[in-house]
């Protein structure tokens, strides 16, 4: 192969990777600053939710609270008997 063919092949194979790699590096430049800001907002939100939950026992969406646990067993309704025609017939 000639040098020109090798150069074209290298450009075709490595060109898109170099362009995408440069774009990825540029997009990651402010990553640490953005992450710190996001962590700060999430911490403030969690503290606000914790304060709100401590102030009221009601759910945050205004719905009903959790049901009280049952102290007595539910009564049996009826006895279920097998139907005679429903038995499996083995041949």
Image: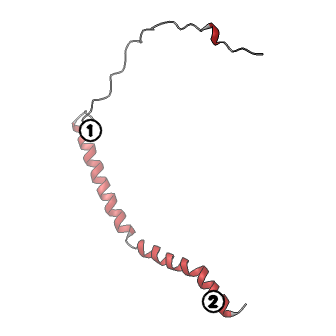
Frontmost residue, 15 versus 64? 15
Q: Is residue 48 above or below residue 21?
A: above
Which residue is found at the position 75% from the left and 15% from the top?
Answer: 90
**Residue 18: horizontal and vertical position, in percent?**
53, 79
Label 2 sits on a secondary structure element that is helix
Position of 18 with respect to 8 (left or right) is left
Position of 10 with respect to 30 (left or right) is right
Label 1 sits on a secondary structure element that is loop
Q: Quadrant of the N terminus?
A: bottom right
Q: Is residue 12 above or below residue 91?
A: below
Picture quadrant of residue 58: top left
Position of 43 with respect to 4 (left or right) is left
Picture quadrant of residue 16: bottom right
In the image, farthest residue toward the front = 85
Frontmost residue, 50 versus 8? 8
Which residue is found at the position 70% from the left and 93% from the top?
Answer: 2
Frontmost residue, 80 versus 50? 80
**Residue 57: horizontal and vertical position, in percent?**
25, 33
Q: Residues within 10 Å of mark 2 (few under 14, many from 20)?
A: few
Residue under pointer 2: 7
Which residue is found at the position 34% from the left and 68% from the top?
Answer: 33
Separation of disc 2 and disc 1 at Cα?
A: 64 Å
Q: Nearer the viewer, mark 2 or mark 1?
A: 2
Coloring basis for residues: secondary structure
Q: Is residue 89 above or below residue 27?
A: above
Task: Give the mark, 2 or 1, whose residue is nearer the N terminus.
Answer: 2
**Residue 78: horizontal and vertical position, in percent?**
48, 7
In the image, farthest residue toward the bottom = 3
In the image, farthest residue toward the left = 55
**Residue 89: horizontal and vertical position, in percent?**
72, 14
Residue under pointer 1: 61
């Amino acid at each position: 192969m000639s040098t020109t063919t090798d150069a074209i092949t290298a450009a075709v194979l490595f060109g898109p990777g170099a362009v995408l790699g440069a774009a990825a590096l540029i997009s990651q430049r402010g990553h640490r600053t953005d992450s710190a800001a996001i962590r700060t907002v999430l911490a403030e939100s969690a503290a606000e939710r914790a304060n709100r939950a401590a102030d009221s026992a009601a759910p945050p969406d205004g719905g009903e609270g959790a049901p009280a646990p049952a102290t007595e067993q539910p009564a049996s309704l009826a006895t279920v008997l097998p139907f005679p025609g429903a038995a499996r017939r083995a041949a």
